[in-house]
Image (tube, grey):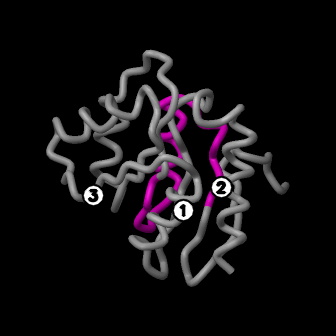
Amino acid sequence: FKGLEHRLEFVREAHGMKYYDDSFATTPESAIIALKSFNEPVILLAGGADKGADFKNLAREIKKRVKAAVLLDGKATPRIKKELLKIKYLKDKIKLVFNMKEAVSEAKKIAVAGDVVLLSPACASFGMFKNYKERGRLLKNEVKRLM
């Protein structure tokens, strides 16, 4: 069974780093489940449109499991950042980006061989992207350019 597109989908390995597209994860709960799927250090790509979700539990999971959080600019992103800072997640481990190209580039700077780069946004895509499918496709295109 191959799995479904944009649902914890393995994109490729590049320079020893594994990239995953979980663009369908548009709630904090689904992003938490994705994070729990990995034992490796994770660089998380998250953030986006605000649906009024509570990000407290996600912030706690990020603090436990995430090496760095690359946040895509959106209405919910400041709320995620606020929750992270509230629980003393280091400010220098949070990077704000304005498009998928910047997100992948920033993740590549942080990641080392053995790390996982995971797009699991915990937010809706509208605003920066047409939908979750476009967001996932853009991730895949940027990862392919790394090779």
Q: Along the polypeptide, which appears first: circle 3 or circle 1? A: 3
Tag 2: residue type? Leu
Q: Quadrant of the C terminus?
A: bottom right
Q: Quadrant of the N terminus?
A: bottom right
Residue 126 in the image, given as x and y percentages of width and height: 62, 27
Residue 17: in magenta span: no
Horizontal side of 126 relative to 72 (left or right) equals: right
Mark 3: which secondary structure? helix
Farthest-out residue, front = 98
Q: Along the polypeptide, which appears first: circle 2 or circle 3? A: 3
Mark 2: which secondary structure? helix
Q: Which residue is mark 1?
A: 104
Determine the residue positioned at 25% across, 40% down. Answer: 84
Q: Which mark is residue 93?
A: 3
Disc 2 to disc 1: CB gap under 8 Å: yes
Q: Which residue is mark 2?
A: 139
- State the extent of the magenta-drawn residues as a range: 20-44
Residue 128 in the image, given as x and y percentages of width and height: 59, 36
Q: Is residue 86 above or below residue 112?
A: above
Determine the residue positioned at 27% across, 49% down. Answer: 63
Circle 2 packing at 10 Å, graded few (<14), some (14-19), many (20+), is many
**Marks 2 and 1, how far apart in space?**
7 Å
Q: Is residue 50 above or below residue 7?
A: above
Determine the residue positioned at 51% across, 58% down. Answer: 102
Disc 3 to disc 1: CB gap under 8 Å: no
**Most foreground residue, 141 or 65:** 141
Circle 1 packing at 10 Å, graded few (<14), some (14-19), many (20+), is many
Q: Along the polypeptide, which appears first: circle 2 or circle 1? A: 1
